[in-house]
């Protein structure tokens, strides 16, 4: 199963895909978007870490494939954050891929 997501953000009444945010947001809004994406990233990482542990403990047959789906989703999220950060030159307030100790 391939996991995909598309983030849409309401900007002054208009729905904007997250990949287009840098073109329509000011610096403060970009920083806020980075914070939101950081929060989403942290929650997804925690969820995936728990799910992956449970899959290992229970000997889930498709563990490797499912974890690869997780990794692709996290890579996509990290790339979206990088693009916004690169555009704005802002420093995100949340770290990279996941919680300390991996995940």
Image (cartoon, rainbow, N blue to C red):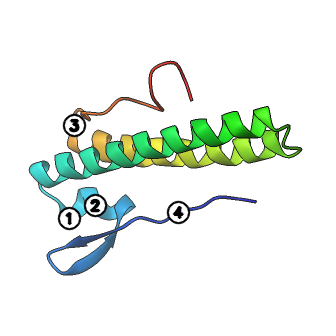
Quadrant occupied by the C terminus: top right
Quadrant occupied by the N terminus: bottom right
Q: Pointer 3: residues within 10 angstroms few (<14), some, or many (20+)?
A: few
Q: Pointer 4: residues within 10 angstroms few (<14), some, or many (20+)?
A: few
- Residue 82 in sight from this viewpoint: yes
Find disc 4 in the rendering and name its residue: 5
Labels 2 and 4: the sequence-earlier one: 4
What is the C-alpha distance between the residues marked 2 and 3? 14 Å
Residue that sits furthest to the bottom in the current view = 13
Q: Secondary structure at mark 4?
A: loop
Q: Secondary structure at mark 1?
A: helix
Indicate the position of residue 73 as horizontal and vertical percent values.
58, 49
Find disc 1 in the rendering and name its residue: 24
Q: Secondary structure at mark 3?
A: loop
For residue 2, what is the image quadrant? Answer: bottom right
Q: From what the image shows, is residue 11 above or below residue 65?
A: below
What is the C-alpha distance between the residues marked 2 and 4? 16 Å
Find disc 2 in the rendering and name its residue: 21
Q: Which mark is residue 89?
A: 3
């Amino acid at each position: 199963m391939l996991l995909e997501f598309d983030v849409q953000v309401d900007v002054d009444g208009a729905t904007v895909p997250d990949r287009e945010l840098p073109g329509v947001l000011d610096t403060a809004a970009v920083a806020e978007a980075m914070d939101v994406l950081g929060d989403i990233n942290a929650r997804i990482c925690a969820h995936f870490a728990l799910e992956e542990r449970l899959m290992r403990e229970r000997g889930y047959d498709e563990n490797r494939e499912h974890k690869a789906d997780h990794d692709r989703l996290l890579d996509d999220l990290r790339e979206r954050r990088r693009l916004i950060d690169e555009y704005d030159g802002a420093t995100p307030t949340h770290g990279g891929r996941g919680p300390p100790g991996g995940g």
